[in-house]
């Protein structure tokens, strides 16, 4: 028997634009190729220049690094200034919050995440199909990765 997800009847969420997911705590905004293309175009930059200016490589499992946006010294997203300065071009990770596998994987994970987000469990109802479309979008847009410098034999 296949276990139904806890969100089988949907979940409520409406972004309050409070920026608590964009500020105050260290974190990563991992990017897909499409994210980088859209963001670099929005900033009027070449892809490689965008990566050099606005991104950092984060060590991951298996001797690989993942591409993430930088953050400021105070942990704000590099594109936060009185709100998101790239809102129309924001990465998939930002557009699909809170419908990430790490958040909707269990009721406990959802409850933990909602302590920092006033938009969770309030506002617009999102169906199981909408939630699963967000999860599928992440699978369809894999993250930019590279072999970590100094790693041999991969």
Image (cartoon, rainbow, N blue to C red):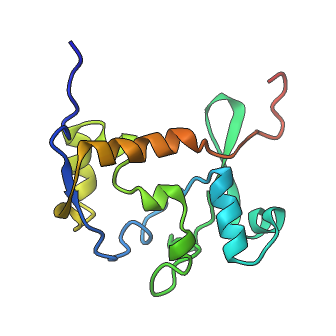
Classify residue 33 as left or right of residue 83. right
Classify residue 120 as left or right of residue 34. left
Identity of the residue furthest to the bottom in this view: 82
When asked about the image quadrant of residue 43, the answer is: bottom right
Q: Is there any visible trace of residue 74 in the rendered image?
A: no
Q: Toward the viewer: 13 or 72? A: 13
Q: Is there any visible trace of residue 76 in the rendered image?
A: yes
Q: Looking at the picture, how far across and down is residue 1, in whole percent?
A: 20, 12
Classify residue 32 as left or right of residue 84. right
Residue drawn 79% across the image and 74% down it: 45
Residue drawn 67% across the image and 75% down it: 42
Q: Is 20 drawn above or below residue 110 in the view shown? A: below
> How many numbered discs?
0
Q: Looking at the picture, how far across and down is residue 18, in whole percent?
A: 32, 77
Q: Looking at the picture, how far across and down is residue 78, in whole percent?
A: 59, 73
Q: Quadrant of the C terminus?
A: top right
Q: Is 96 drawn above or below residue 135 in the view shown? A: below
Residue drawn 65% across the image and 68% down it: 39
When asked about the image quadrant of residue 124, the answer is: bottom left
Residue drawn 60% across the image and 41% down it: 142
Identity of the residue furthest to the top in this view: 1
Classify residue 58 as left or right of residue 147. left
When asked about the image quadrant of residue 107, the answer is: top left
Q: Looking at the picture, how far across and down is residue 44, in whole percent?
A: 75, 78
């Amino acid at each position: 028997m296949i276990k139904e997800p806890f969100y089988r009847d949907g979940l409520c969420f409406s972004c309050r634009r409070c920026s608590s997911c964009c500020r105050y705590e260290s974190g990563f905004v991992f990017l897909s190729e499409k994210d980088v293309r859209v963001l670099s175009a929005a900033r009027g930059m070449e892809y490689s220049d965008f990566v050099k200016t606005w991104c950092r490589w984060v060590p991951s499992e298996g001797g690989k690094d993942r591409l993430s946006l930088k953050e400021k010294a105070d942990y704000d997203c590099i594109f936060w200034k009185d709100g998101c300065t790239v809102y129309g071009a924001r990465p998939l990770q930002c557009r699909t919050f809170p419908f990430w596998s790490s958040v909707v994987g269990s009721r406990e994970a959802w409850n933990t995440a909602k302590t920092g987000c006033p938009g969770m469990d309030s506002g617009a109802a999102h169906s199981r199909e909408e939630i699963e479309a967000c999860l599928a979008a992440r699978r369809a847009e894999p993250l930019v990765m590279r072999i970590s410098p100094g790693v041999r034999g991969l």
